[in-house]
Amino acid sequence: MKKSTHSKKKSGLSGKLRIGDDWNAITIIALSQNNPLKAIAEFVENSIDAHSRHIIITRGREGGEPYLRIVDDGEGIPQNEEGQPNFKYVATHICDSIKRHLKATGITGLQGEFGIGLLSFWTVGEELTLTSAGMGGKTYEMKMRKGEPGYRVKGKRVLIPQPGTELKIKPLLPGIRQLNGDKIQRYLASELRDRIRQSGVTIKVIDRHAGKQYIVEPREFEGRLLHQLPSVNTLHGEIYLELYLTTPTPDNSVSLYRPGTRVLEKITDLDAFQHMPWSTDYLQGIIEAPFLNLTPGTRTGIIQDTPFYDFCRSLEPVEQALIKIIEEQKKAEEERASHETLRAIQKAFKEALLALPVEEYDWFDIHKKERGEAAKSPKDIKGIAVTDSEKETNLEGNESISNAQKQFFEYAGPLFSVRISPTSCVVPVNEEKTLHAIPRDRSRLLIEQGITFQWEIIEGTGTLSDHLDEMVTFKATSEPGLTHIKVTATQNAVACESEALLTVTDALLLPDNKEPTTFQQGLPSYTFKRASRELSRSRYDTEQNIIVINNGHRDFVYASRFNALKLRYMCRLFSKELVFKNFPGHSTEDLLERMIELSLYTEEHLK
């Protein structure tokens, strides 16, 4: 007997999904909004969609309970056939948005498409009261409570019916009672930036707890607006870019909008944008893509579907352009920082060398510069080398520039400080030393007139000549010792003092073979050369008057972690090179002593 062979049909079931527990679904939807500020923004958007011209948000206390109220002058709740606000439709058509139906008929400018915005009051407070007027001026209100499935609608007696809608939530949840008016204002200014601009609505936030009120102004970005970026279009629509290049700070970010309303505060919250240039701190602004699809619950998530994929791909040319712009900005910042570092180092050395003996550091010509003598090489008053194009603007005290050509800020102000140059020096017994008082105003400009001086020896031996002049001559005695000298500079009722310490010795600390330098080039500049395999930290280029710093050395890399540490490290390299150049032929011990001396006086003025 033959067995029949046949394929067995697989049985299966098919059907449509549906809600098993309606109330449980409503609860999940109502609690899906995790940001109470986002919920408030949605309430305000409802008022904007109702063509309101004025919206007032009030934070206060009533009957001992905190509340939040939003009042607008818009068109109110749509009315039913009886001319009453159709609260029943609002309460019984969750997830069936009127706005979605209106947009399907061609009406534009509306926000919202899920019909769940009102339920987000559950994340703000316990009870919602929605009030709106119907035909004939009669006012009605609807109340809903958090966690309860019912709603109540009843008439409300008012003296004068008001157009628009009033939404009131009380009491507020304990966790958000510290949500002040300033935070609400700042959030709405960013969240609804373009919606406020486009609609022209005026939004006022009144904080009765703090006794303050705020006007919500659309957020203005800082920095330079970037023009001529590549245009961005997709099959799904156009992408609007408004990006600004600004000073890098951790608070800078590019936000994602859809349209007019912020979806994400930082586009880098999306994995697809956690790279250059979005991950840098140089950009502010917005990217607006109206065709992106949102996650309905929070409306702060993007569904990563085909429109999103096309959105990411279309921004690639913009990313390349922005990376190039940021690299140029970084280069300019490095050049500016390098110039500021040089100015800081040279200023510190100038102050140090004014305090140190001229004959011991005769390689620098800033001493005679400070005294107003004519310069032999193009440097400014601070002894900093300048280019030919800068000579006429930077030279102070140049004989070719008359007083009549001085700008207002070049004239010295009132006396602020005085300094003795040198502040510390060595004088052989029975020899003389000239000391110079340098008076300055608050801006450190040299004061040339209207100052009287009084010199005196406050401790030690020796004599002073011309003790009432700007410059005095100290005559050492035949006995070694320490002499403290003080000068008092007076201008009108202002008096400033400075002291100097002179060491009188029977033998100079300098070797007899110390030769005066035949050329004076001023304080050098610096440049970088990366040589990570070399042990040398720096070297001095005599012909160019430049200190070449090895920025590949491990010490430079270590110091570069902090700007202040890097500045001190570079200053010590300057001290090393300048001491080595200024004291040729000295022993290692002498060079180390001089380096400590120069570093001490320099780092005091390093800022």
Image (tube, grey):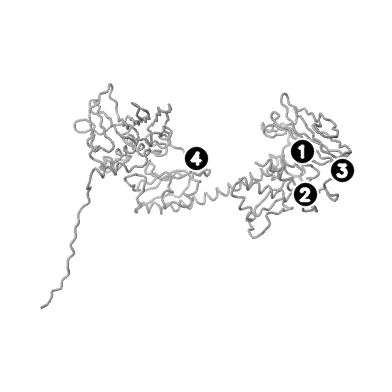
Disc 2/disc 3 C-alpha distance (Å): 24 Å
Name the outermost residue toward the bottom.
1
- Return the residue at label 3: 506
Q: State the residue position of label 2.
A: 582
What type is the residue that disc 1 sits on?
Answer: Thr
Q: Sequence order check: which comes first, mark 2 or mark 4?
A: 4
User: Of discs 2 and 4, which sits in the foreground?
Assistant: 2
Say what amino acid the circle numbered 3 marks: Asp
Q: Quadrant of residue 256?
A: top left
3D distance between C-alphas at marks 1 and 4: 47 Å
In three-dimensional space, the C-alpha distance between marks 2 and 4, rounded to whole angstroms, equals 49 Å
**Helix or strand or loop: what does disc 4 sit on?**
loop
Q: Of the numbered discs in the image, which one, if any, rests on residue 423? A: 1
156, 99: nearer the viewer: 156
- Residue 148 vs residue 119, the one in the foreground: 148
What's the mark number on residue 222? 4
> Three-letter amino acid code at disc 2?
Asn
